[in-house]
């Protein structure tokens, strides 16, 4: 009995072995074919949308970067000597602060733990702090969620300072730092508030629009410190300190941000360089949707996933709102004063997007998946918006009356549309896999960019 069985088994085993071998061969070639066609399809899509490797910004002068590094962490340039650029653009928090809306003067602590100080006058900044990744690349010519500052050396520079805007900058990023030092709620401080040493804040008594006076006092804060003498002389050889102004301070900050926050080594960058293995299959499928029937590319175009243009995607109106329109924030419309631009915001780059939560101009969405899902069905997203995801201090600030919702939905961009059937859960997760592949691993921890100490002697802590 035993013998017979094994006699029968032997050939059948061989047969099984043979079959599985040939099946194996078949599956292998099928996967190969599939993979090939996935890459071919994706590379065709990328070519079709003109997406190629990003040209990194030119190398920055080391002396300018060294000065900018100190200034970026320097509290001396804030009216009350109590906060720096890094208070909101933290190297440990994806060059932002992890808050829905940013907190400036009258608050204490860092990142998500930054809170209003009970005994001080405080106002939220109206918007979410954006990250600083890749702002130094050539194509990046407008700044802010509403594009109110920008320009190029060829076209000149514009800003809320109007005709007072200095014109000598090398890029829009180099022009940027003229702004954060001016608003009272941001770095300058409110009238009457003393500085960190209990002394009068001479900049705090001015008005938000006294640009030139503010800039001169901020510049003097830097030049008055002996610790900055050598840094300034090395960065601007031959320029006497008396001739330095805010444009020099800002240019140095721009050089530093360009040097440290250029992040062009994500898996997607490696794929663009020709390495088919840089992206997972799921990320490739997600990219095919992003550049295909999900039409994300209509606005998130180019290799940095932004057209740097302005669109209304019916973002939930949560938070304080901004300016005359508060509690609404009409975004670009407040800059152009053209109602057709109401509720438009600049398309964010999606580079390092996994490090950028919370999302949107007001930090309306705590999770990346919800930020993406909002695009797929703005109507349902507004109707089901969970206002508990913003910070407790902003609780209850959600304008969702029928009129506002109707205006948001009826004026939203027609570019926001999915071709064909709604995306399945599987497809949404593929898009999320693609978005993850836009993260440069070097951006996860930027603690190495923090100087050991500051020329002003002020503390780097908090
Ligand atoms: C109190 C928090 C805070 C401080 C301090 C701060 N920022 Fe910002 N930053 C913001 C917010 C909020 C925005 C967006 C505001 C808007 O769009 O209306 C922003 C925008 C920016 C942008 C534009 C990015 C883009 O994509 O448009 C740059 C660049 C920048 N900040 C650099 C700096 C520099 C340099 C300093 C120091 C001189 C600084 N910030 C200080 C909160 C802050
Ligand atoms: C009509 C133009 C448009 C299209 C199409 C579009 N987006 Fe956006 N997207 C925007 C704008 C504008 C914002 C910022 C909205 C705001 O801040 O209020 C944004 C925000 C985002 C954010 C949050 C970014 C941040 O820094 O807060 C993500 C993620 C995103 N989009 C992904 C996608 C994906 C994925 C698709 C395709 C399914 C897509 N977008 C399609 C215009 C668009």
Image (cartoon, rainbow, N blue to C red):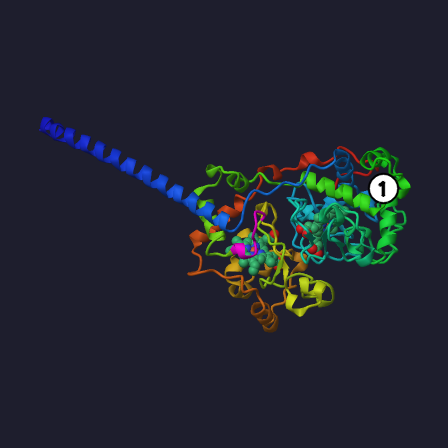
- Crowd band around label 1 with a 10 angstrom C-alpha radius: few (<14), some (14–19), many (20+): many
x, y percent for residue 56: 63, 40
Quadrant for the C terminus, please.
Answer: top right
Which residue is nearer to you in this view: 273 or 372?
Answer: 273
Which residue is nearer to you in this view: 146 or 73?
Answer: 146
Residue 399 against residue 178 in the figure, above or below: below
x, y percent for residue 292: 47, 54
Determine the image quadrant of residue 411: bottom right
- Is there any visible trace of residue 124 in the rendered image? yes
Secondary element type, mark 1: helix
- What residue is shown at x 79% (from left), y 55% (from top)? 183
Q: Identify the residue at the far front of this view.
A: 154
- What residue is shown at x 87% (from left), y 40% (from top)? 223
Q: Is residue 221 magenta?
A: no
x, y percent for residue 235: 80, 36
x, y percent for residue 2: 11, 27
Residue 120 against residue 85 in the figure, above or below: below
**Which contiguous range is marked in magenta?**
296-304
Determine the image quadrant of residue 415: bottom right
Q: Identify the residue at the far bottom of this view.
A: 403
Which residue is nearer to you in this view: 399 or 267?
Answer: 267
Quadrant for the N terminus, please.
Answer: top left
Number of numbered discs: 1
- Is there any visible trace of residue 365 in the rendered image? no
Q: Which residue is mark 1?
A: 222
Q: Is residue 300 magenta?
A: yes
């Amino acid at each position: 009995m035993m013998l017979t069985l094994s006699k029968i088994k032997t050939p059948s085993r061989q047969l099984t072995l043979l079959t599985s071998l040939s099946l194996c061969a078949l599956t292998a070639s099928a996967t190969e074919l599939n993979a090939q066609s996935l890459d071919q399809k994706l590379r065709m899509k990328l070519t079709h949308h003109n997406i190629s490797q990003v040209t990194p910004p030119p190398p920055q002068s080391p002396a300018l970067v060294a000065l900018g590094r100190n200034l970026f962490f320097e509290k001396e340039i804030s009216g009350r000597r109590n906060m720096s650029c890094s208070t909101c653009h933290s190297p440990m928090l994806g060059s932002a602060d992890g808050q829905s809306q940013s907190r400036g003067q009258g608050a204490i602590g860092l990142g998500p733990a930054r809170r209003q100080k009970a005994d001080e006058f405080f106002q939220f900044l109206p918007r979410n702090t954006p990250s600083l990744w890749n702002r130094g690349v050539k194509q990046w010519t407008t700044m802010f969620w509403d594009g109110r500052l920008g320009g190029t050396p060829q076209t000149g520079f514009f800003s809320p300072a109007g005709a007072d805007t200095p014109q000598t900058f090398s890029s829009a990023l180099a022009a940027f730092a003229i702004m954060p030092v001016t608003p009272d709620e941001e770095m300058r401080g409110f009238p009457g508030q003393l500085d960190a040493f209990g002394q009068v804040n001479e900049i705090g008594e001015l008005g938000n629009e006294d640009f030139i006076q503010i800039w001169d006092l901020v510049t003097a804060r830097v030049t008055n410190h002996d610790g900055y003498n050598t840094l300034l002389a090395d960065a601007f050889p031959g320029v006497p300190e008396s001739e330095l102004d805010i444009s020099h301070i800002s240019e140095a900050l721009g050089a530093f941000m360009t040097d440290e926050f250029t992040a062009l080594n994500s898996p997607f960058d490696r794929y663009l360089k020709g390495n088919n293995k840089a992206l997972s299959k799921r990320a490739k499928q997600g990219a095919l949707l992003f550049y295909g029937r999900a039409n994300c590319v209509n606005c998130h175009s180019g290799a940095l996933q932004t057209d740097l243009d302005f669109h209304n995607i019916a973002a939930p109106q949560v938070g304080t709102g901004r300016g005359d329109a508060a509690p609404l924030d009409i975004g670009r419309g407040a800059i152009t004063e053209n109602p057709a631009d109401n509720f438009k915001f600049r398309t964010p780059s999606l580079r390092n997007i996994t490090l950028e939560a919370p999302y949107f101009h007001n930090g309306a969405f705590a999770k990346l998946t919800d930020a993406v899902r909002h695009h797929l069905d703005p109507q349902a997203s507004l109707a089901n918006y969970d206002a508990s995801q913003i910070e407790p201090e902003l609780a209850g600030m959600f304008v969702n009356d029928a009129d506002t919702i109707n205006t948001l939905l009826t004026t939203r961009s027609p570019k926001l549309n999915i071709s064909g059937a709604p995306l399945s859960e599987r497809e949404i997760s593929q898009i999320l896999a693609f978005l993850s592949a836009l993260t440069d691993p070097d951006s996860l921890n930027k603690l190495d960019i923090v100087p050991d100490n500051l020329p002003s002697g002020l503390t780097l802590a908090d």
